[in-house]
Amino acid sequence: MSNKKTITIGANTNQPITINRFGYGTIRLTGDFVWGEPKSRTEALQILKTAVNKGIQFIDTADFYGEDVTNRLIVEALYPFQTDLVICTKVGTSRGADKSWTVFNSPENLRTSIENNLRTLKIEQLKLVHLRIMPNTKTPFAEQLQAMFEMQKEGKILHFGLSNVSRDELTEALTSGQIASVENAFGYGQRTSFKAHYQEYRGMQEVMNICIENKITMIPFWSLQNSLPKNDDKISLIAEKYNATPAQINLAWLLHYNDLFLPIPGTSKLKHLEENVKAMDISLSEDDMKYLG
């Protein structure tokens, strides 16, 4: 059990980055189905500015959000970026004009995505990039890894991580190079595994021991989505104890669960962002954690 206020990304490398241990995921800033402009551009920009003003130093994005909507919003709201801001992007998929999600992970595709992110974010190096593991791919995983590590050697990427990764894939990746972070679905109600849109289980729990052993930062996504099991009022009872919301307790639980966790709750409402950030100030007791599990 822990509740450290900072976290070090790339602790297993010679270029570690230490930041505040709470991030923001931008996926909710797009229109419906992660496509198009936000419903309120003014509020979206204010959310990004407020996040940084409240001490958030980690923003999760992707060029396929929108498409390319969140990257442009980030630039509009925050450029030139503070030197301590980590903008983390993802590659491995793209969007069709019909709003479909398509595999985009050949070495040529990955390079195109990296160049696109560098261009739209107006930077020369991406501090952290996650390779999104996609189903039904024709490109062998080893070739995807090789392409990413090659771009890291070229200086386009500082730290490299994996998203939606299984235990076996993470093990394979670690034989090829250093992995700084893992971004998998995980939350209070997803502790054993989370069934993604396709029929494979990719929960955070099954890779957690490998991450701990290798000092790999764990970035849980969807931690507040479908996170409360039916007929389970434990979170609500703890929330009442601390005069907090269930979402705040869920995030506090993550922060206490393991000090390698870096939550990135997303929202399109400024009010919810401000509520989420307050979770950092909640100190759960050992009894609370035992009660929640």
Image (cartoon, rainbow, N blue to C red):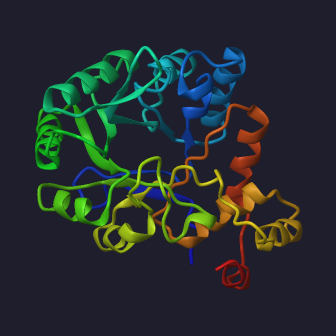
Q: Is residue 40 above or below residue 244?
A: above
Q: Quadrant of the C terminus?
A: bottom right
Image point (23%, 40%), residue name: 137
Query: Where on the picture, by quarter, is residue 167?
Result: bottom left
In percent of width and height, residue 164 lies at 38, 51
Quarter occupied by residue 47: top right
Q: Quadrant of the N terminus?
A: bottom right
* 221 sits to left or right of 105: right
Q: Is residue 146 above or below residue 96?
A: below
Residue 80 in view: no
**Residue 71: x percent and y percent?**
46, 22
Residue 89, position as x, y percentages in the image: 39, 35
Q: Is residue 234 above or below residue 218?
A: below
Q: Nearer the viewer, residue 77 or 250?
A: 250
Q: Residue at x 74, y 57 (%)?
A: 248
The front one of 125 and 73 is 73
Q: What percent of the width, then of the height, locates residue 240?
A: 88, 67
The number of numbered badges drawn on the structure is: 0
User: In the image, what residue occupies the spot 24% across and 36% down?
Assistant: 157
Residue 54 appears in the rendering? yes
Q: Is residue 258 left or right of residue 101?
A: right
